[in-house]
Image: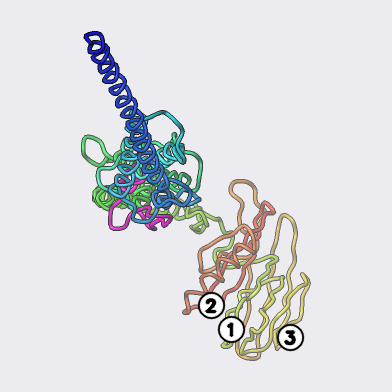
Amino acid sequence: MKKWNELSKATKRISIVIGAAVVLGGGFGGYKVYAQQQHNQAKAAIEASLQEVGDQGTLAKTIAAFANEKGYLAKDLDSKTIYTAKQQLNTLRNSIADYEEKYSNEDLANEAEISKLENEISTVESKLEAQLAVNKLYQQETEALNGSEVAKSLILADKVDAKTVESVKLDKFFEDEWKKTVQGLLDQATTQVKDIESATKAVNDCYKDNKVKSDVTKKSYEAAKKAVDKVKRQTDKEALQNKLTEIKKVVDANEKKAKEAEEQKKAEAKKKAEAEASENGGTVVETKEGEYEVVSESNGEGNTGSQSQSQAGNNSSGGPSRNSGSGYYSSGNSSSYKGGGSSNNSTSDGGTSTGGSSGSSGSNSDADNSGSGSGSNSGGGSNSGSGSNFGNTGGAPTIVSGYIGNSGKVFDTALEANTWANNILDTDFSKNGYYLVGIFYSDGSEKFSIDWY
């Protein structure tokens, strides 16, 4: 009986242990099932979140819209919008880290897209930073660049200098249309800075010790003015123009002094020439260069020997005839005289004249030229002259034929004389026309003068 009781007790103990073992076994299996369920639920949740960064995900589309295919940023894009999208990516990245810490490092659908979007948003963020820096280089009435729109007539902002422009770097960006446009804006800013620097130097070169140089030239002033005209920033332009005004005053004063000195020099030269003519004879003539020279005349205002004249313009009321001795005179296309037609005296032994003019006679020789003649025009005019002209024995050449017209001008060629006279006729309507006078000198040379009528 005692043994049974002991066996019964022993059996009870085994039953308790087995029962406990059975209970424990059943509890472990339930916990494992529960844990798997939690894992599956967490994985489903994280994968649902990752759908946002997939090809059709809302977050992916949002970030893709920050820039277009040419690289331009979205119009009116700001830092706050970029920050919001960036925070969403960070939240998703942290959720993945929590999941992997609790469960496993298994690959999740679209997990790789997070890194791709993080790179994209980082590039957009850097571009926006550079774009804002470029916009600040210019006066902010209109942004220099917004989206793909570039403002026109941009003017450098105050206090922007070369160092400010150079601080904007684009080296890290890939070449696209956005980068080309931003680089163009930087180049434009650099040009405006250089224009200011060049104009400032050109103006300051006309100064010394804060005063305009006394010997500043008109050329220096014009170069400085041209440089200042290129400056766009008004603050700099006005300051430089104020300095230009002071430079102009000195230049004008210097030019006035130079002109007065030139006029004085010219007057003295004319006076000297007149004195020489008074002492030695001859006529003071102003050359086309504005200088004065004394031209010797053998017979005062009379002219002998061969002579040629051509009348330009229209003399409807007749005109003077200064032909004496042998020679010829040709009239213009429409000229006429009250006493008759145009004359043509072309022989040394005598000649005839249409319109009622009588011939003349004379003789010519190398060393002794003399002639006399008379003529009459039926209309009352008369041509007569007498005199002699002896050969030149040395010194300045003398006039042997022709004369210096009342213009006082002597020209090397007929073309120069005609051109000058026609220009005068275009503006001086008090003159009816002119004669082109051929002047022959004792050294064989020929020049031309203008005689107004």
Image mark for residue 315: 1
Quarter containing the N terminus: top left
Q: Looking at the picture, does residue 351 appear above or below residue 18? A: below
| Above/below status of 308 relative to 446 | below
Q: Is residue 254 visible?
A: no
Q: Which residue is mark 3?
A: 354
- For badge 1, the amino acid type reads Asn
Kindly identify the amino acid type of the residue bearing the numbered disc 3: Thr
Element under disc 1: loop
Left or right, residue 244 beside residue 326: left
**Badges 1 and 2: C-beta atoms under 8 Å apart?**
yes
Report the front residue among 180 and 410: 180
Q: Is residue 135 shown in magenta?
A: yes
* Horizontal and vertical percent position of residue 117: 42, 41
Q: Amino acid at mark 2?
A: Tyr
Give the residues drawn in magenta, as a range: 129-154
